[in-house]
Amino acid sequence: MKIVKVFQYSALLLAFFLASCAGTKPQENSMGDSGCAECGEQGELDLEIFDEVGFVEINPDLLKNLDSSAILGSFPSQNVVAICPENEKICHSFSEDAVDFDLAHYEDSLVEANFPKMIHEQMLEGLRIPDGDSLTIRQMLQNLLQQNFADGEVLASLTPWESRADFPVAYSAFNRTVPNALKNALSEVSKKYNVRYVSLPVMVQVQILPDIGKSGGFTWKSLWTFWDARQGELVLLSYNAFTAKTKSRIAPERGWAKPFADRLGEALRRDPKTIENH
């Protein structure tokens, strides 16, 4: 098995799609990236989801009282793991950049649909992050991820959420105190880059499984967080893990994040009154 793992911060996520089909004629597809005219069947994935568990923690008051005109900064995934059999030929190059771009594509759509009045900024160098701030922001994010958050574990750890996850998704109201060190790390990001809210995918992992379904499948695991960075408070946390197999001849060459995005959209639209403490 080939394992690619990266703690990344790159402004060149689109480069994957520009290079993935060298030697073929680009064509438009549903994701807006460059497709391969000579690949297999194109179209939307038809998936069956199983072995699903999830945990969503929401601060009902903050979710209900979001400042709709504020600036929301979206960071790229901090830890990406892309796993594929060595000899498996995937038309669109499968890599950590591809997985991160796929997640960012669906996250952009979610932000636009759920927070239409917010100013949405990509937290990438040369965009919201000034040129030359690469080392600074890496250090800030590393510091943030290594702060304790729950059960004596650092924010980068999946352990607290794996133990709480249930089928298909367990919901809980956030009622814990964010440690001061984590609050301060979030506030530092907010002040330096003038953003009120921050979305931070802590971890995402996709493993291609070529022998399931009609045209293969994959497993997905992710931890996605949404913060009121100015206040240093959690708005929403979503942990998801599932297996997806194809129900048609369309291979899983992209669109891995769509099932996750569908579930995150449900969480963002959930009536805060229906969320209880667990």
Image (tube, helix red, strand yellow):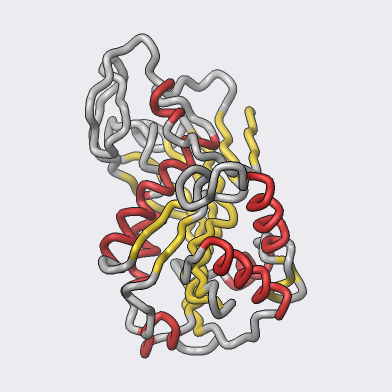
Residue occupying the far top of the picture: 23
Depicted 103 relative to depicted 17: above or below: below
| x, y percent for residue 201 | 53, 56
Q: Is residue 238 visible?
A: no
Tally of numbered tags: 0
Residue at image point 54% right, 55% down: 222
Residue 28 makes an appearance in the image: yes
The image position of residue 160, as x and y in percent, is 66, 70
Report the residue at 47% width, 89% height from top: 276
Q: Nearer the viewer, residue 112 or 250?
A: 112
- Indicate whether 47 appears above or below 266: above
Residue shown at 29% from the left, 40% from the top = 45
* Quadrant occupied by the N terminus: top right
Could you tell whether 3 is left or right of 169 in the image? right
Residue 58, position as x, y percentages in the image: 48, 78
Out of 99 and 195, give the one closest to the viewer.
195
- Residue 190 vs 200, above or below: the answer is below
- List the single residue furthest toward the right: 152
Image quadrant for the C terminus?
bottom right
Residue ID at (48%, 73%): 236
Task: Please state which of residues 32 and 206 is positioned toward the viewer in this rendering.
Answer: 32
Q: Position of residue 156 (x, y in %)?
A: 67, 60
